[in-house]
Image (tube, helix red, strand yellow):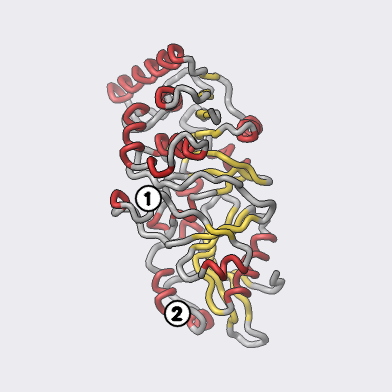
Amino acid sequence: MTSTYAVLPYDATAWPPALRRIARPEVLERWGAVDRSPHAPRLVTVAEGDSDGWSAAALVTARPGTAYVKIVDAVGDVPAAVDAVLSYADEQRLAQITWEGWTVSAEDAAAAGFAPLRLPLTHGREEAADEPAGPGSGYVRWTAGEGIAEPPPYYRQSTHFTCGAVTALLARAQAGAVPRHALDREAELTLWRDATNFPACEPVGLGVAVRRRWPAASVEVFLDTDEPVLLDHLSGSEREWRAVLQRASRSDARRSGVPVDGRRLSLTGLREAIGRRQRVLLLVSLATMQGFDVPHWVLCHGVVPGAVVVEDPWFNAAAGETWVDAHLLPVPDASLDAMSLLGEERVRGAVLIGPG
């Protein structure tokens, strides 16, 4: 890999002349079309001999609190640019490099050691007409091992509140209990309707809805509080009637045989569950990754050295994210531990689903 490279600040208002000489105008126009600042954009550059010019450059970004870096585009001498990013990722001890397929061919990506990512299930579907446009391909390279052998499909939630239902459907699709072609908006909204605490899905209600939908699957809920959750932003009657529904969910859990464990699921326990081929629906705050403290469900389905691999059914197109950021996303154990403690009481909610 390239040993000499530079990492420079990214400023879409003042492209360096060295960059303008090797990047097509339409590429720079796309780079500057959104505010990428929330995700630490930077230029990884390779000098051209002893001159002030560059032989290659790549725009890279990443969500805060994660263990990957994404190549938006590589320009100039593309193999040299990618080698520089690989060296950068190695020095940063990152688990993964992804590459958006705006300008790279599948052949060139493969030559650089990248494997293709399966397109999102919503790609090209009529119900996804309002979904932010993204690249028509994406690629991944893991820095240690082969990554995830049988990854789940990627599906972007179609509302701001159906993340719990989508993660459950993705878990069952990965287990083969839901045909991939059947994971659509109707399936998403139908499961959400059965699980919702209006509009969020709290852990016990989500676990009960999963058991109703797939009676043969083993389901277990971990929630280290007896109090209602996800209601800190509400007060008075708006809080009270949702608390009633959460108590009803606990009664439903007892009747349907869904165990609710009052202990906090540790990161060690989460990794062990994945090792048993269980899938973990985990509540996290988006404060670290996106900058706003909103509870959100992700699917934890794989482990790599130092990180847990998750599916995030939402991405922030306004910050330059695409489905490539949210699919097979590695999150370091310490980051995941911190971001999955929610609310004033710092509780953790998780739903474990077995492969049955």
Report the label total. 2
Q: Which tag, 1 or 2, sits closer to the chain's start?
A: 2
> Which three-letter amino acid code belongs to the residue tagged 2?
Arg
Closer to the camera in the image, 334 or 3:
3
Residue 147 appears in the rendering: yes
Q: Which mark is residue 239?
A: none
Q: Give the spatial CA distance, label 1 vs label 2.
A: 30 Å
Question: Measured along the vertical axis of the image, is residue 129 above or below residue 54?
Answer: above
Category of crowding for the residue at label 2, using alpha-carbon neighbours closer than 10 angstroms: few (below 14), some (14–19), many (at least 20): few
Q: Is residue 308 left or right of residue 236?
A: right
Measured as percent of width and height from the top left, residue 217 is found at 50, 25
For disc 2, the marked residue is 24
Closer to the camera in the image, 254 or 282:
254
Measured as percent of width and height from the top left, residue 60 is found at 54, 64
Q: Residue furthest bottom?
A: 51
Q: Which mark is residue 122?
A: 1
Closer to the camera in the image, 176 or 213:
176
Measured as percent of width and height from the top left, residue 311 is found at 50, 44
Category of crowding for the residue at label 1, using alpha-carbon neighbours closer than 10 angstroms: few (below 14), some (14–19), many (at least 20): many
> Which three-letter amino acid code belongs to the residue tagged 1?
Thr
Question: Measured along the vertical axis of the image, is residue 84 above or below residue 123?
Answer: below
At x 51%, y 19%, the residue is 260
Residue 296 appears in the rendering: no
Whether label 1 touches label 2, CB < 8 Å: no
Q: Nearer the viewer, mark 1 or mark 2?
A: 1
Question: Measured along the vertical axis of the image, is residue 69 above or below residue 109?
Answer: above
Say what secondary structure mark 2 lies in. Answer: loop
Q: Is residue 323 left or right of residue 82?
A: left
